[in-house]
Image (cartoon, rainbow, N blue to C red):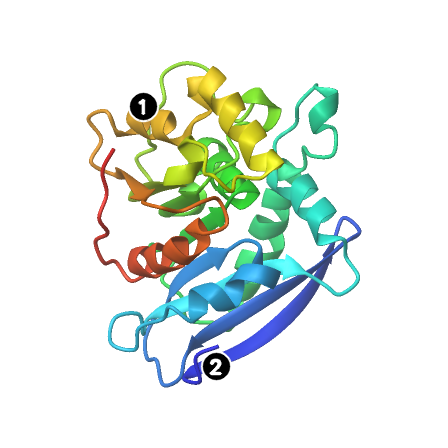
Amino acid sequence: MCEDLISRTKCFVFNGQRYRVFISHRRGTGGNLNPLYLLDANSQFSVVTERNNRKRDGDILYIGIGYQDGVDILKARTRDYTVPSGEKEFAEGGGAAAFYQFIAACVKPWIEAHYPVNVDQQTLAGHSHGGHFVLYTLFNHPDAFQNYLAASPSIWWGNGALIPDGKLTIDEHVNQVTLMVGEYEEKLHPQSNETEKMQILRMNATPNLRARNLAEKLIGNEQRCSFVFCTGRRHPGVIKDYAQVANLIAGHRPQNDGL
């Protein structure tokens, strides 16, 4: 982690689930901080904070939501980050609404009570199932954050149960929506594993499950949505690009985009 960052953790218990929140900001930062809420903090928090640029990203407060020691993280994130589905294949998920309540009722109030934050410039960012939860929040609680970053979102979960019916629009409270996808999340890579192959085949059979298609629908005439294509990246490799883009968004810097 960057030596110039001041870091701490805070543990919570909510509905019997044990969470650990990681918090960092640059040493000597003055004034209000722009909150960047990150999911999958146990594995990705340091990846994002290490992309902090001293001159560019000094006003970011990093808040990573993770799990305490002893928690089965794979099982917990599947439960917390995904929407309900009546299909047996997706029975282990469906807790997105409860997880959102944890963030809204516990994490955000605690952060705002302990740090000087700019509540008009809050960003929520996640990758994979984390990106799924970002989109859930965008569609169901759009006024909770002003910027949303969904990298490699698991839109396929529940065969698209996440996507609202009818025309997709961006709520007036939202400043920016960014979707990201790796080149080899849309087509097979010579080294694609069986899970990657299954997801690519699923999305090719049902284009509405692709992040690119969702971005096209959201962009329309909206200037507040962008799509970032990560050339040469497979699903795990997108995390490095996602970390950089998360810093750019929270620091209010433009990022390259295109469909």
Residue drawn at x 45%, y 41% is 152
Camera sees residue 221: yes
In this rendering, would 96 be left or right of 203? right
| Above-or-below relation of 43 to 82 | below
Q: Are marks 2 and 1 in contact (CB under 8 Å)?
A: no
Camera sees residue 122: no
For disc 2, the marked residue is 6
* Residue 99, picture quadrant: top right
Residue drawn at x 53%, y 60% is 44
How many numbered callouts?
2
Foreground residue among 173 and 238: 238
Are there few (<14), some (14-19), or many (20+) residues within 10 Å of tag 1?
Answer: some
Locate residue 25, reporting x and y percent. Answer: 43, 75
**Looking at the image, which residue sits at the far top?**
166
Give the mark nearest the N terminus, 2 or 1. Answer: 2
For disc 1, the marked residue is 217
Q: Nearer the viewer, mark 2 or mark 1?
A: 1
Q: Amino acid at mark 2?
A: Ile
Are there few (<14), some (14-19), or many (20+) residues within 10 Å of tag 2?
Answer: few
